[in-house]
Image (cartoon, rainbow, N blue to C red):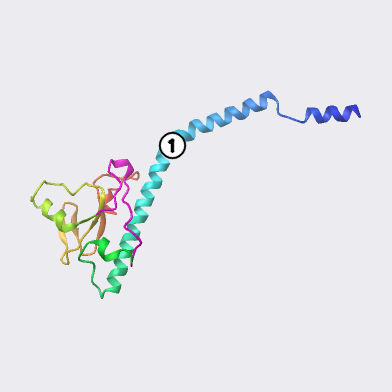
């Protein structure tokens, strides 16, 4: 009987060496993973912004189909919310210093500034959604945009090295 109780006592816990090995392994994992956490967060926010852009483009396209091949010619907020999209999503560009905003700039304003009226380049890198509401399309600093185009007004790059305005 005494031998059985001694066996139970010996198997009841961990040794100090085992605990130290576990702590060292956890420390190494934390040292490798912890520095990458901000990058993971930034990547997740970028993915959210790209998804929001796709949702906004889809809402504009559904509007186009419902309105006999006409894109909105007024603000997207007035044209799309709440029938085609619940709300205008925020444009978050965390690594580029832009404040998250759900503002949608219109290309006529962008074009006026790109042609020298007002401050040059004022609307080319503002970190918000952009929409071309002009039927003929226009030439802006990023190139020609067509009626109904939605893009991100930012000249910075994402973590993959792609310029935001090219999405």
Q: Which residues are magenta?
A: 83-103
Using the image as rendered, state which of residue 138 and residue 70 is in the foreground: 70
Can you say whether 98 is above or below 78 in the image?
Answer: above
Residue drawn at (26%, 51%) of the image: 128
Q: Is residue 82 magenta?
A: no
Residue 50 lies left or right of residue 24; in this view the side is left
Q: Position of residue 115 (x, y in %)?
A: 9, 52
Q: Position of residue 27 (x, y in %)?
A: 54, 29
| Disc 1 secondary structure class | helix
Q: Quadrant of the C terminus?
A: bottom left
Q: Position of residue 163 (x, y in %)?
A: 27, 48
Residue drawn at (29%, 69%) of the image: 63
Farthest bottom residue? 68
Farthest left residue? 117
Residue 10 lies left or right of residue 107; in this view the side is right
Residue drawn at (44%, 38%) of the image: 37
Residue 63 lies left or right of residue 119; in this view the side is right
Residue 38 lies left or right of residue 78; in this view the side is right
Task: Using the rendered view, name the quadrant where residue 52 is placed.
Answer: bottom left
Q: Quadrant of the N terminus?
A: top right
Q: Position of residue 165 (x, y in %)?
A: 25, 51
Residue drawn at (65%, 27%) of the image: 19
User: What residue is pinned by disc 1?
Assistant: 36
């Amino acid at each position: 009987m005494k031998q059985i109780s001694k066996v139970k006592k010996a198997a009841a816990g961990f040794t100090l060496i085992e605990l130290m090995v576990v702590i060292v392994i956890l420390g190494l994992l934390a040292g490798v993973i912890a520095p990458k956490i901000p990058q993971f967060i930034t990547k997740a926010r970028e993915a959210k912004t790209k998804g929001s852009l796709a949702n906004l483009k889809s809402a504009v396209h559904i509007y186009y189909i419902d309105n006999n091949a006409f894109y909105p010619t007024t603000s997207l907020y007035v044209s799309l919310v709440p029938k085609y999209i619940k709300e205008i999503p925020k444009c978050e560009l965390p690594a580029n210093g832009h404040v998250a905003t759900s503002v949608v700039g219109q290309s006529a304003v962008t074009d006026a500034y790109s042609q020298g009226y007002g401050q040059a380049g004022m609307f080319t890198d503002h970190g918000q959604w952009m929409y071309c509401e002009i039927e003929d399309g226009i030439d802006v600093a990023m190139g020609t945009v067509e009626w109904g185009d939605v893009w991100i007004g930012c000249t910075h790059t994402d973590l993959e090295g792609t310029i935001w305005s090219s999405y």
